Amino acid sequence: MDISAPLLEARNLVKTFPGVRALKGVSLTLHRGEVLAVIGENGGGKSTLMKSLAGVQPADSGEILIDGRPAEVASVPDALARGIALIHQELNLADNLDIAANLFLGREKSRFGTIDKPAQYRAARPLLEAVGLDADPAALVSTLCIGQQQQVEIAKALSLNARIIIMDEPTSSLTTRESEKLFKVIRDLRSKGVGIVYISHRLVEVMDLADRVTVLRDGANAGNLEKSEISHEAMVRFMVGRDVSRFYPQKSGKLGDPVLEADDLRSPAHPQHGLNFTIRAGEIVGLSGLVGSGRTEMMQTLFGITPATGGRLRISGNSLVPQTPMEAINVGIALVPEDRKKQGVVLEMAVSENLSLASLRRDQNAALINRRAENDLCSEMIGKLRIKTPGGKQPAQFLSGGNQQKVVLGKWLAMRPRVLLLDEPTRGIDIGAKQEIYQLMEQLAADGVAILFVSSEMEELLGMADRVLVMHEGRMAGELAGIGLSEESVMHLATGGCHSTSKSTCN
Amino acid sequence: KPSGSGSGKKKVVFVSNGVDPFWTNAAAGVRDAGPKFDVDAETIMPTEGVADQKRIIEDLLTKGVDGISVSPIDPANQNDILNTAAGRTKLITNDSDAPTSNRLVYIGMDNYKAGRMTGELVREALPQGGAVMIFIGRMEQDNAKTRRQGTIDGILGRPEDPTRFDPAGTIIEEAGFKIMGTLTDNFDRGKTKANVEDTLSKYPDIAGMVGLFGYNPPIIIEVLAQAGKLGKVKVIGFDENEATLAGIQKGTVHGTVVQNPYMYGYKSVEVLSELIKGNTSVIPANKMIDIPARQIRKDNVDTFWAELKKTLGTAK
Amino acid sequence: MQLKKTLGITLLFFAVCILTTSLSENFLSSYNLENLLRRTALFGIISIGVAFVIVTGGIDLSVGSVVCLSGCGLPWLLTTQGWSLPSALMAVALVSAGIGLLHGLLITRLGIQPFVVTLCGLMMYRGIARGFTGDQTVGFGDGFKGLRSLATGRIELPFIDDFALPAPCVFLLVIALLAAFFLNRTIYGRYLLALGRSEEAARYSGINTGCMTVLAYIICSCLAGLGGVLFVLDVNIAQPSDCGNFYELYAIAAAVLGGCSLRGGVSTIFGVIIGAALMQTLRNMITLTSRHQHMEFAIIGAVLLAGVVADELMKRRNIRRRAVRALREESTPA
Amino acid sequence: MQLKKTLGITLLFFAVCILTTSLSENFLSSYNLENLLRRTALFGIISIGVAFVIVTGGIDLSVGSVVCLSGCGLPWLLTTQGWSLPSALMAVALVSAGIGLLHGLLITRLGIQPFVVTLCGLMMYRGIARGFTGDQTVGFGDGFKGLRSLATGRIELPFIDDFALPAPCVFLLVIALLAAFFLNRTIYGRYLLALGRSEEAARYSGINTGCMTVLAYIICSCLAGLGGVLFVLDVNIAQPSDCGNFYELYAIAAAVLGGCSLRGGVSTIFGVIIGAALMQTLRNMITLTSRHQHMEFAIIGAVLLAGVVADELMKRRNIRRRAVRALREESTPA
Ligand SMILES: Nc1ncnc2c1ncn2[C@@H]1O[C@H](COP(=O)(O)OP(=O)(O)OP(=O)(O)O)[C@@H](O)[C@H]1O
Ligand SMILES: Nc1ncnc2c1ncn2[C@@H]1O[C@H](COP(=O)(O)OP(=O)(O)OP(=O)(O)O)[C@@H](O)[C@H]1O
Ligand SMILES: [Mg+2]
Ligand SMILES: [Mg+2]
């Protein structure tokens, strides 16, 4: 084995999808004991590159070298045999099976083709410990919450004893605390000589972890940064191709009357805790908490998806607890949901149809679709939100994540909401689109909309929110504003006050 | 419409009421008669009941055939299509008549009478009466309905009345007989078998079993053989399935009533070819060409079978 | 878009027609065309109903049994029970709608799978029809000629001699136009299409998806009920153990042939009608031209499969071609 | 876990048995039990096959037609064509496996939906059987007694007089044990369960999901083929136009009753057998105790629906109860 040669080298990879050339000759080098961050805008080709390195979607042309020798990685088993493991951007678990079964799927510990379950459970425990997941290996994956499932994915990659581990946005559904555990694992692996490719849109993490950064733009290399060159500005410059000044917009600061007042509101997931809070017109309020702390549940209760089991809610002074989303919409509440692809847009439908889906009812002519209103709305929103699409007829599935999110926002802007609920509005969205969404939020607030947004990104929370509500295990743990608002104070409340080792209670 | 078929031969078609070995015998008659009377003769068997039969007749009229012999599934309600056919081609009925339609003549027998003949066989087999179960493919079609009613009336020795109807679920106790019911199987042979088996479970002392559709008796024999009750339970069949005839030879089946489907086919072609030529003298005054049913018992089974083999043999 | 999706099946349909014409000079006779149109109309109506359910991503296996229930129920009520025509028709309509409502509620409220719910329905409704008729054939005999002309009537067309439009075609035409209009022009149609692709996204947009899904099942059952009525008016009798057997499969096959995806969200009413016409034409062709009538379903099955496979291959080729074109365009300016 | 999923159906089954026993003293007669066991075994075998396909999230509508093809094919080859027994059996097995392979390849390679592929199969294979038999009944007559004892034979049990185990039960037992072992203990079974729930998760774990899916369809068709052979050996004759009609629906219903989810990834072989037994017991019950034989399917459908609904309601209550318990536990220490 040639020690001086890089662990993994990709040269000139090209990958074409119907209508899209996702990779136009991308190269990448990874050394032993190194964390290489790969960043870039949505649709830049990061995931595609990783999938071709891991044999999931082999590249059309180009070369992959391992230890300096050309290696063919045409399938997942090929990649596994060469010690390459990939944690996918999306969760890929069979939730009808238990944790151990998922960890060793495809590589079962077996005797004569029969599975040795005890051996699997034994082998699973240390792996779960390493990623900080306190769960029985015999527990069904369907009983875990998203964050825990992500931890199972990470443990699975560890179980491969891979020499190269690729992580495609592993922290997108983890909060700071869970992320910290992951970073510890990554540092451990690095010290053992494992090469790690780390993809994230959270530049803070990248600065924390990365030894080197490779930036992709439009399916091509946009630049490389050595450890010493890594800085927020440098990364952004490469990603966007220009300087991005003033990341978070200026706050206007004028607050109006209370618009949303919750009084002892009880969500079905945590009916034992009543929620109390108030949001004023023009205010941007952040909602923080650990994974599974009940933030999404609260948003869904406010929006009538999972109607409240008790308590009162006042919207602009009128009492109403929405029992269906329609009722919520009628009083001026809008929700940009957490799972964009499933709940936000109808992927196969055209951009224009997605944009009008909520306002059709309002613009109807005796139940007929008002085509003119639909087209007007479409061009208005494409212009206003700068949605990048060849036209209104383009199916939403062909848009990048950021542009899909803008479509969801556009759908609700058309309804002129009084209260805008945003659940992880920038998850998996690149920096350019993020900034546009921030500006939009600020502008809406200036127009008197009350905004409540959930975020697991501390930086965004502190940058955007006038005030932060913190949830812990289904209850409102506290409220922070002004000088009291800091990363430490949020984490303190989110972890349940003083003790930092309390286990997260999912399921 | 006149025939357009290329061979120049007149075209006649025999339409059955379903798919069954019974109709295979009729088809043999059709095939044999074709060359004899110099016509192009064909048999079609509808699979999906009455709607399918209608569709086939319509398509045949389109095709332009010179004569059709049809076994209407439910004559009382099929006048429309029969009259349409009668208006466009020579139409006769077989096996089951449609007297109110414009058909030219009916070739066949009276199912009620044949049923009574079956009933007589039951009385012979069970002189001191007993419990009897009737098995049949379906209750709905006209020939099944009248055949079953004839059988019941025959067993009980009631006066003739083809319009009488006893619902399937009623137990009829008369004249020393107890008719336990009628079980249908919708042509699912597995279900027939289950019906016979379940009858043995339900009435261990059953005295007689009557299978009114051709495929019923062989399955009854099969089940009785497996249960070791051959001979103990009297079997009376209908139609001339090989296993039924073999059972009569062996004495495990008391007897069967046979129609003459071969003759239905043969005669249909003959009558149609004459009608096409313009010879209406083949139509009797009562518009019925009777091909009577016969009772087959141990004494005449050998001659009948030999005859049957001969007529069917010529077809092959 | 709509056109492209139905292009393949339309071509196939014309190919079958041309083939049959060349094999049998009677195919194009007005008598045959009328028969074919009537059958297509009858099956087309129930296929459109099924298409509504398929649009929501569901399936309705009970169509044949609902055909049976209404097809047996109407003559039974009229002749055996002596109900008046309006009340009998009303009863049939209410029962059909009630069945759809039941299906819809079980599916949306209890979350039971459509396949399972309607499979139970398939067994039940035929059983019920066999029950109330006492397993007897029911029919109109010589009566109800006026009513029957709804199915058997022919409408003389101006300027065309010797050919008249079968009455069921008028039903089909009206229903097809209404269905196409509903799906493509009204907000409720849009809601159905949206929820068929992503129930959640539709729900999160304030659409009452449960209600819309129930509506689709009601439409399906009602059209099946109407189909049953027209079938029995056409044939004049119905046998409860037979009537409508397997019709759900023919209807689903017609919808799939016509371009509906069982994954939901896609519909072309025009395609569904062509699909129904293709199936009927194939059966007609086999009776007209071949002596192997019992091979009928082997041939229909094979054509159906060939159609679906060809469609799939064509789709793939199109995508590949479009990709190549896009790339070329991309590289030209560079 | 497995037990819990099948608890409801097992209770229902026992309830039906107890009810029937109380209504008819003949239900528990050894003759009746033997018959019931034999029928359950025959339907159980094809239901297990279908369960394999359902585990992958697919569906096989062609089961009844494959039963018809092999059930007509075997006697036809043996009696009409005069093939030797081994070659005829081999041919039936190969054709059945080939059908499964075809389905699997069309589904995995071309991405056509299982419902569509097997719907075409449903039409084709019966048509083919009707074709080669010339639409004639085929059967063994008085011959092949030895072969037929595979289906009609009874195996005397030690210590039990007057009751013998029907031979098909041995087949069922062996197949069920193998199937349960395969699904729960072997890595391939694990692969099937995983890909049924999330095809991608399995594929990304390096599992050849295409290959495993094809395998499931082959198993299903082979068991359907075996079922067809046993059916015809039991009844002695087969009529191609009727043999096996609707058996796919009975098999799917048994699998669903037994706890398989049509969404894939869940299987309980034991439950499937109980499901098949329940359906057969219901039919037996109706013949034994009621005069309304034609209501049979209405009753079966209603029981099936009631079972599914009760199951769903129970699941919900359990979830709610667990939630309440969790709340109480949480609030106690506080
Ligand atoms: N299976 C596919 N079929 C067609 N196009 C695809 C496919 N997968 C990816 N693409 C396209 O390839 C391009 C690169 O996508 P990729 O997922 O690699 O981006 P990414 O950098 O990972 O973005 P993100 O940050 O949103 O995860 C995009 O334009 C995307 O739409
Ligand atoms: N549909 C559901 N069924 C059962 N439990 C659920 C459901 N949705 C959420 N939960 C549970 O409710 C709790 C709160 O979940 P929620 O999604 O509201 O948390 P969150 O703070 O938004 O976390 P995340 O960042 O993962 O979205 C978790 O324990 C989760 O497992
Ligand atoms: Mg990505
Ligand atoms: Mg959340």
Image (tube, coloured by chain):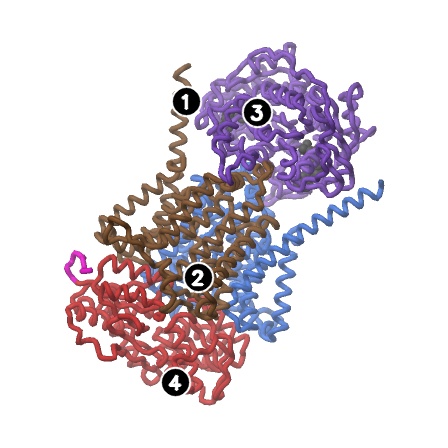
Chain colours: A purple, B red, C brown, D blue
Which residue type does callout 1 highlight? Leu
Q: Which residue is mark 3?
A: A402
Mark 2: give few (<14), some (14-19) or many (20+) Cα within 10 Å.
many
Quarter of the figure with the C terminus of chain C: top left
- Are discs 3 and 4 less than 8 Å apart at CB? no
Q: Circle 1 sits on which residue?
A: C327
Q: CA distance from mark 3 to mark 4?
A: 86 Å
Which of the labelled discs sits on residue C71, or is there none? 2
**Real-space CA distance between mark 1 and mark 2, rounded to the nearest whole angstrom:** 57 Å
In the image, is the residue at mark 3 within 8 Å of ligand 1 by its beta carbon?
Answer: yes
Q: CA distance from mark 3 to mark 1?
A: 24 Å
Say how many tags the image has.
4
Q: Residues within 10 Å of mark 4 (few under 14, many from 20)?
A: few
Horizontal and vertical percent for residue A262? 75, 35
Residue B17 coordinates in the image, percent (x, y):
34, 67
Decide: is A9 above or below D134.
above
Of residues C264 and B175, the one nearer the viewer is C264
Gap between marks 4 and 2 measured at Cα: 33 Å
User: Which mark is in front, 3 or 1?
Assistant: 3
Question: Which stretch did the figure color magenta?
Answer: B1-9
Q: Amino acid at mark 4?
A: Glu
Residue B203 in the image: x percent, y percent? 54, 78
A23 is higher (above) or lower (below) than B121: above
User: Are tags 4 and 2 found on a single chain?
Assistant: no
**Tag 2 subunit:** C
